[in-house]
Image (cartoon, rainbow, N blue to C red):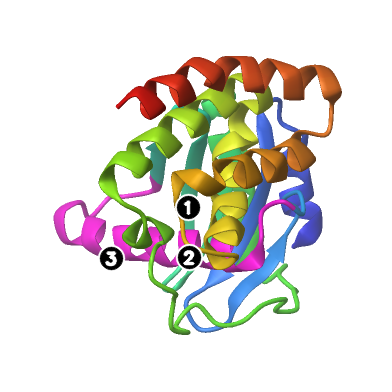
Amino acid sequence: MIHLIDELKVIPGVIGACIVSSKEGIKVTNLPSIFKSERLNLVGKHLLKLYSAGWMSFDDLTDVSLHFDESVVLARELEKGLLVFAICDPTFNQNLLTMSFNLLHEEFKLGNFSAVPVSAPLNEDVAAPVEATISGTLQDLLEEMKSALGKVLGPMAGFVFDEVLESWVEQGTPDFSRIEELIKQIDQEIVDRDKIDHYRQLISSVLQNFQKG
């Protein structure tokens, strides 16, 4: 089925797609490497829970969409415990993606599905959210920094920031005294010098206001 989700990726605004199983985890994905398997497994787990809850209220439920500032996640359950989801730019063509989901679903029903699990099962224990280890005031600052990154990296910003933040927390106590370490790690993900300078300009006033209290 990799050829089918590759066709999804051709749709303007679609960053990539993933098929996940409640028992086997990720079965196939063509999302950029910045989207770590652990994070995709967690997204898949939440989407499957949404479907389970949705079926209780809507017997004609087809697609589930989640809209964020930087991205949109659109999901379709192929069968109980197995779904495909795509991560998109907010400007993506939803009608075209829905039509492609219909085609993929038909192919699945015909048995045209072969994929090797590439990650751990979804039912593995999931680490506590990073936010649980960060104070409220610092969390507000980080949310502003995350929002600013969206103006530089677009729809991938949220995922990039979350991955870097998780690594930063693992390296030491999440405190403002270490904020420059976090910014440097974000710089490494941005790569482009002009974009790095632009991001630092965007967050400079935010950091100053935080220091002033």
Residue 110 visible in the shown view: no
Predominant secondary structure, magenta span: helix
The reply to whether dot 3 and dot 1 touch (C-beta < 8 Å) is no
Residue drawn at (53%, 37%), measured in percent from left and top?
A: 98
Apparent side of residue 17 relative to residue 52 in the rendered image (left or right): right
2 or 1: tag closer to the N-terminus? 2
> Is 68 on the left or on the right of 12, as rendered?
left
Q: Please provide percent x and percent y for residue 117.
A: 70, 79
Residue type at the position of mark 2: Leu
Residue 208 image offset from top left, x and y in percent: 45, 21
Part of the protein shown in magenta: 34-63
User: Which residue in the protein does label 1 denote?
Assistant: 76
* Amino acid type indicated by mark 3: Ser
Q: Residue at x 58, y 45 (%)?
A: 159
The span from disc 2 to disc 3 (Cα, nearest Å) is 16 Å
Q: Position of residue 36 (x, y in %)?
A: 66, 61
Identify the secondary structure beneath mark 3.
helix
Q: Which mark is residue 52?
A: 3
Mark 2–mark 1 distance (CA, rounded to whole Å)? 16 Å
Question: For mark 2, what is the residue?
Answer: 42
